[in-house]
Image (cartoon, rainbow, N blue to C red):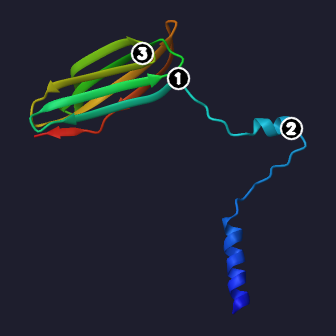
Amino acid sequence: MQMKKILIMCLCLALMLPVTFVYASSDMELLENDLIQPMFTNINVFYNDFQITDRGKALLTSSVDARNVDKITISTYLQKYQNGSWTTVKHWTTTQSGSLAVLGESWYVASGYQYRMVSYGYVYNDGQLLESATYISDTEFYE
């Protein structure tokens, strides 16, 4: 019985030890190229939030946090679904210098329709577009 307890303890200790994987290659350059490395883009975060209050006020927020940029543009659209297609109710755009831009707007909507937010973020450096991102919210129905 004592031997069984010792064996179980040894097994538990062995399972708790870190596992090390070894990669062997005769070509060191091949090894260096096989390492997994993050491939970052200029936009770090493209945050968006869309909601409609009980009183029909649509709240739209969009922000872009980026790196290695000197200008950011955000274009946000409030859209209504009517007659089988989405039409723009209101459109806002902001262009801000630096690496962070925020756009926050509100608009009262008519009841009985579905609404959504569509937002585009563009980041620039020295006047050259580096990257863009698109966001389309879930649909919100206002009764």
Q: Which label belongs to residue 84?
A: none
- In 3D space, how far apart are the residues under numbered discs 3 and 2 (Cα atoms)? 42 Å
Image quadrant for the C terminus?
top left
The residue to which callout 1 is attached is 42
Q: Amino acid at mark 2?
A: Met
The residue to which callout 2 is attached is 28
Quarter assignment of residue 106: top left
Report if residue 119 is visible in the image: yes
Viewed as shown, does residue 81 lie left or right of 128?
Answer: left
Label 3 residue SS: strand
Q: Position of residue 27 (x, y in %)?
A: 88, 39
Residue visible at 57% across and 29% down?
40
Residue visible at 85% across and 49% down?
24
Label 2 residue SS: helix
Earlier sequence position, callout 3 versus callout 1: 1
In the rendered image, the residue lying farthest to the front is: 2
Q: Amino acid at mark 3?
A: Ile
Does 70 appear above or below 46? above
Image quadrant for the N terminus?
bottom right
The residue to which callout 3 is attached is 72
Contact between marks 3 and 2 (CB within 8 A): the answer is: no
